[in-house]
Image (cartoon, rainbow, N blue to C red):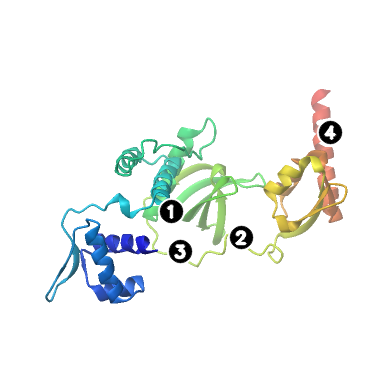
């Protein structure tokens, strides 16, 4: 805890230049006496910290001081390196920074992990798309996109980007859609075309909704009761919340889930093949069955 506070003091001094002991005490929620003890500890450790008297006096660091890596634990150093390495996922030029910090921390194998969120064979395409998204998000530029929805409909719209989100193995863009006049979550891979507009927007019209609404009360979602065979149990624990899974004596798994009432859920349930049974509601079971029959009939015609 003390080492964390010492690092915070150094950070504040680097950021503010000069700061008084009472200001440090308030910022770190400790007593002024504790601050002076910490200053002494920093001085003993070789940090060139000094106090000056007078109207503009306070605690300062010697000019051109760079913080000592000893203020960070080995685990904290690894976390910093990992966080910077993760920026390479969106093609950010961080190699030089990694080399500098790796040398400062004396970690020869700084590049011990590689994080790449781009799709196989799509690295250049995805990197360009992320660069455009970053430009729009930081500069508050509207985006004109062509988007393919889960229903298969493709349309052109203008959106005001808010946040880029990585969730459940995929990238999403939370944005205000001018066409829908509401917030929407767009899957980045389904953005077919993307153009950053020159204009800037000041503020979004409203506050965004939570990323995960209460599906039990959310309009457009329906409760589905499913039974999965033991052979597919690994997927069930991967893709459903443990509290919604009820193991049965015969090894099967009962799952209560809430899904959007659109074409996506049919394709998703079909991905389990014959390892899933739809118990409720009956109309969903009939819909999925009729969809499977249509697929079979389509391929039968192709064979004729």
Q: In this rendered view, identify the residue nearer to me: 300 or 67.
A: 67
Give SS at disc 2.
loop
Viewer-nearest of labels 3 and 2? 2
Q: In this rendered view, identify the residue nearer to me: 252 or 79.
A: 79
- Calculate the distance from the C-alpha at mark 4 to the C-alpha at mark 1: 45 Å
Residue ID for mark 4 = 297
Instruction: Give the x, y percent position of residue 160.
Output: 46, 56
**Mark 3 burial class by Cα count in 10 Å: few <14, some 14-19, many 20+:** some
Instruction: Give the x, y percent position of residue 186.
Output: 56, 51
Instruction: Give the x, y percent position of residue 286.
Output: 86, 49
Residue 139 picture quarter: bottom left
**Residue 212 badge:** 2
- Mark 2 or mark 1: name the one nearer the start of the chain: 1
CB within 8 Å, label 4 to label 1: no
Residue ID for mark 1 = 142
At x 32%, y 76%, the residue is 31
- Mark 4 or mark 3: name the one nearer the start of the chain: 3
CB within 8 Å, label 1 to label 3: no
Q: In this rendered view, identify the residue nearer to me: 80 or 170.
A: 80
- Calculate the distance from the C-alpha at mark 4 to the C-alpha at mark 3: 48 Å
- Mark 4 or mark 1: name the one nearer the start of the chain: 1
Asked whether residue 196 appears in the rendered view, the answer is no
Give SS at disc 3.
loop
Give SS at disc 1.
loop
**Residue 204 badge:** 3
Residue 106 picture quarter: top left
Which residue is the extreme one toward the top? 304
- Calculate the distance from the C-alpha at mark 4 to the C-alpha at mark 2: 38 Å
């Amino acid at each position: 805890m003390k080492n964390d506070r010492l690092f915070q003091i150094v950070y504040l001094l680097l950021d503010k230049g000069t700061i008084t002991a009472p200001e440090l005490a308030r910022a770190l929620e400790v007593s002024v006496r504790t601050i002076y003890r910490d200053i002494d500890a920093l001085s003993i450790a070789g940090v060139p910290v000094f106090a000056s008297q007078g109207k503009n006096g306070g605690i300062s660091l010697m000019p051109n001081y760079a913080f000592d890596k000893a203020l960070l634990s080995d685990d904290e150093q690894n976390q910093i390196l990992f966080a910077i390495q993760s920026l390479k996922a969106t093609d950010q030029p961080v190699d030089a920074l990694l080399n500098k910090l790796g040398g400062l921390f004396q970690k020869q194998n700084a590049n011990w992990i590689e994080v790449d969120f781009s799709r196989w064979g799509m690295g250049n395409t995805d990197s360009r798309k992320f660069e455009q998204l970053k430009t729009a998000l930081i500069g508050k530029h509207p985006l004109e996109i062509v988007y393919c929805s889960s229903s298969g409909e493709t349309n052109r719209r203008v959106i005001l980007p808010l946040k880029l989100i990585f969730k459940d193995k995929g990238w999403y863009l939370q944005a205000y859609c001018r066409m829908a006049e509401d917030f929407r979550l767009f899957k980045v891979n389904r953005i077919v075309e993307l153009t950053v507009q020159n204009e800037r927007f000041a503020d979004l019209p409203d506050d965004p909704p939570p990323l995960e609404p209460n599906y039990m009360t959310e309009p457009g979602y329906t409760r589905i009761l499913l039974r999965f065979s033991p052979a597919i149990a690994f997927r069930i624990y991967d893709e459903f919340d443990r509290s919604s899974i009820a193991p049965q004596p015969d090894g099967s798994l009962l799952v209560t889930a809430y899904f959007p009432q659109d074409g996506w859920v049919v394709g998703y349930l079909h991905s389990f093949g014959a390892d899933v049974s739809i118990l409720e509601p009956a109309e969903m079971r009939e819909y999925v069955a009729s969809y499977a029959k249509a697929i079979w009939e389509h391929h039968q015609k192709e064979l004729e």
